[in-house]
Amino acid sequence: MIDQAQLNRLHRYAVSLCRHGDDAFDLVQSALASFLEPPVKQFDDPIPYLFTSIRNRYIDIYRRDQKVQSTPLQDEHREAADYDLQVLETVMVNERQVNYLMNMLDDQEREMLFLWAVEGYSTQEVATLMALPKGTVLSKIHRLRQRLHQSKARENNCGVSL
């Protein structure tokens, strides 16, 4: 039903939400346990359902613990990662760069970037998975790219290299 590659995708998605491997494992395990409870739900592709379940569980847990962090849409004090932003879909970055980038984003941006750039979902699919209008996803990705370009320009102007 669900193979190892799909489990790895689910775990990577959960890590993109909560940033901690153990918490991500718990989210995936909880979503799978719920999914496999009788009666087992019948889906052609259970991954989108499990992504939504993981996301909802993440939101529930962190609302309950009051750990949901909010950050302003524009944060001028963030630094840029060491990578080229020609076309985000084709950028090859190493693990350090990915960790730095993911840590500079808020929860929603991190989830959106993961689904779009890492998992390769279209903006319409990201919008559906995140229950957002497609225009919102497009504008958030655009603002994210602008912010990253500005950070990269500031880094180059200051002569700073991370």
Image: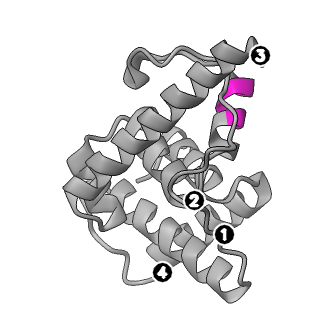
Q: State the extent of the magenta-drawn residues as a range.
A: 95-100
Mark sitting on residue 160: 3
Mark 1 touching mark 2, by CB under 8 A? yes
Asked which secondary structure carries label 1, the reply is: loop
- x and y percentages locating residue 160 in the rendered image: 77, 16
Q: What's under tag 1, amino acid-wise?
A: Gln
Asked which secondary structure carries label 4, the reply is: loop
Q: Residue at x 34, y 40 (%)?
A: 142
Q: Which of the two discs, 2 and 4, sits closer to the camera? A: 2
Asked which secondary structure carries label 2, the reply is: helix
Q: Which of the two discs, 1 and 3, sits closer to the camera? A: 3
- Could you tell me if residue 116 is visible in this image? yes
Labels 1 and 2: the sequence-earlier one: 1
Type of secondary structure dominating the magenta stretch: helix
Q: What's under tag 3, amino acid-wise?
A: Val
Q: What's under tag 4, amino acid-wise?
A: Glu
Q: Disc 1 designates what residue? A: 69
Mark 2 touching mark 3, by CB under 8 A? no
